[in-house]
Image (tube, grey):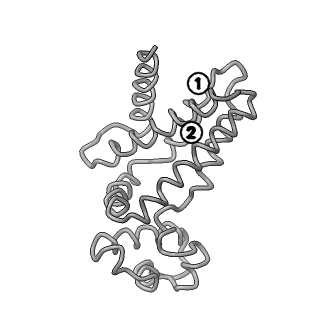
Amino acid sequence: MARWEPNAQERLVRAALELFTEQGYDATTVNEIADRAGLTKTTFFRHFRDKREVLFAGQDTLARLLADAIDAAPGPATPLEAVRAALDSLTATFTDDRRDVGARLRPVIAGHTELQERSALKRAKLAEAVTDALHERGVSEPTASLAAELGIRAFYDAFDQWADPASKQTLTELTRHTLDELRAALAALD
């Protein structure tokens, strides 16, 4: 593979996941990831600070996508309707060709405490982005935080189902269903 080919970041992510699956996260070096992707170590560091970050590529993009979709939701939308629109926008980017990445990603993260901590931080940052976007729409607390947490929980629960190779539903379908279940569970608490 020529070094000038496009999609260097995606190539690095896929190479890292392959290597982490084959030989383990701890045993894999940045040089090996770059070599497998057909790139240089310098190119790796243009995209990522370290090998841990390769597993969390695009977090800022996801947060921006969620915030932009909440901003674009119709004015009379309820907080959960705005969150649902944001989740639809986000999950539409997870096409079936990315399902294998999700399937390999989850066990790598589950096997390492430092990656679990980074994953939890990513989840919190996404919820914060949704909360902030809801605040911009005039949604007050605790409604904004609760709607954000429900939405992000729905996304992560659905992602785990979607990443299962046996799953046939889209991530959008699974996320909508999970959000509806969470809403019903919340209503049943009253």
- Residue furthest out toward the left: 166
Where residue 102 appears, as percent x and y from the top left, is: 38, 54
- Of helix, strand and loop, which one carries label 1? helix
Whether the residues at callouts 2 and 1 have beta carbons within 8 Å, the answer is no
The residue located at (39%, 34%) in the rendering is: 174
Where residue 74 appears, as percent x and y from the top left, is: 69, 24
Name the side, left or right, on which 48 lies relative to 159.
right
Compared with residue 153, is residue 142 higher up or lower down, i.e. above or below? above
Residue neighbourhood size for the residue with mark 2, other residues' Cα within 10 Å, grouped as few (<14), some (14–19), many (≥20): some
Q: Amino acid at mark 1?
A: Glu
Given this view, does label 2 or label 1 mark the residue nearer the observer?
1
* Residue, disc 1: 81
Name the side, left or right, on which 103 lies relative to 56.
left
Between the C-alphas of marks 2 and 1, the distance is 12 Å
- Of helix, strand and loop, which one carries label 2? helix
The residue located at (40%, 84%) in the rendering is: 32
Where residue 12 appears, as percent x and y from the top left, is: 47, 72
The residue located at (51%, 68%) in the rendering is: 53
Compared with residue 180, is residue 55 higher up or lower down, i.e. above or below? below
* In-front residue for pair 61/138: 138
Instruction: Give the quadrant of residue 4.
Output: bottom right
* Of the image marks 2 and 1, the number of the one nearer the N terminus: 1
Q: Amino acid at mark 2?
A: Ser
The residue located at (29%, 69%) in the rendering is: 21
* Residue, disc 2: 89
Instruction: Give the quadrant of residue 133.
Output: top right
